[in-house]
Amino acid sequence: MPMCSRTRWRTHHLDVIADELRPELAEASHRTESLRLYDSSYHTELEWWTGHFETIDGIPAASLVSAAESDRVDIGRAFPAGRDSERRAGIPEDDSTVLVISTDGDTRIDAFRSGEVLSAVLLECTLAGLATCTLTHLIELSSSRRIVGILTGREAMPQLLIRVGEAPAMAEMPPMTPRRPRHEILDFRD
């Protein structure tokens, strides 16, 4: 009699980090940045995406947050700062909620499926009028990834974090981040 094989579907989890645990998450974020302090390839890549504005690649200088704005966000990647220091000065601190997408495993398919979950969460947040910011720097290093896992209270592998909240109004909207022409990134073949 042939054996029946069963496929175990890996489960994804979506957790909210409790407000009282946020200082621990912020400490993990700062520790991650400290561990990357002398990682020249990491900083070169960040500078490449945010530091040259004459081409269609990268983030326009006017879209970068100022150093003052960046200092008000306790859980975020440290990007190079923009020039405008007084933007949103009336907002004392980041008031977002942090979500964590985790999986039972840590395979490529788990990472892929996490992207599908991320897409659904981002779309739902957009429909609800909420702003989002996907965070990956906290899961790029095993030490901070482990802390995020502990904070979720699960025996699962954190894959992504998402800051969710209301976007504060801005006096002047920054320019749109440039997009490449479709023909440069998408090719249809018969």
Image: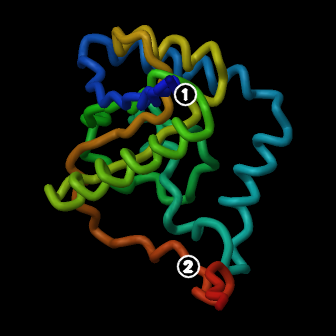
Binning the other alpha carbons within 10 Å of mark 1 as few (below 14), some (14 to 19) or many (20 upward) gives: many
Residue 63 as seen in the image, left or right of residue 108:
left
Residue bearing the label numbered 2: 179
Residue most extreme to the front? 1
Looking at the image, which residue is at 50% across and 12% down? 147
- Residue 23, image quadrant: top left
Mark 1: amino acid: Leu
| Image quarter of the C terminus | bottom right
Q: Is residue 82 visible?
A: yes
Is residue 178 rendered to the left or right of residue 36? left
Question: How much space separates mark 1 and mark 2, taking CA atoms?
Answer: 27 Å
x and y percentages locating residue 101 in the rendered image? 39, 32
Which residue is pictured at 24% across the width and 17% down the height? 18
Q: Which residue is mark 1?
A: 138
Q: Secondary structure at mark 1?
A: loop
Where is residue 95 shown, x and y percent of the image?
25, 35
Tell me which amino acid carries mark 2: Arg
Q: Residue at x 75, y 59 (%)?
A: 48
Residue for point 26% across, 26% down: 16
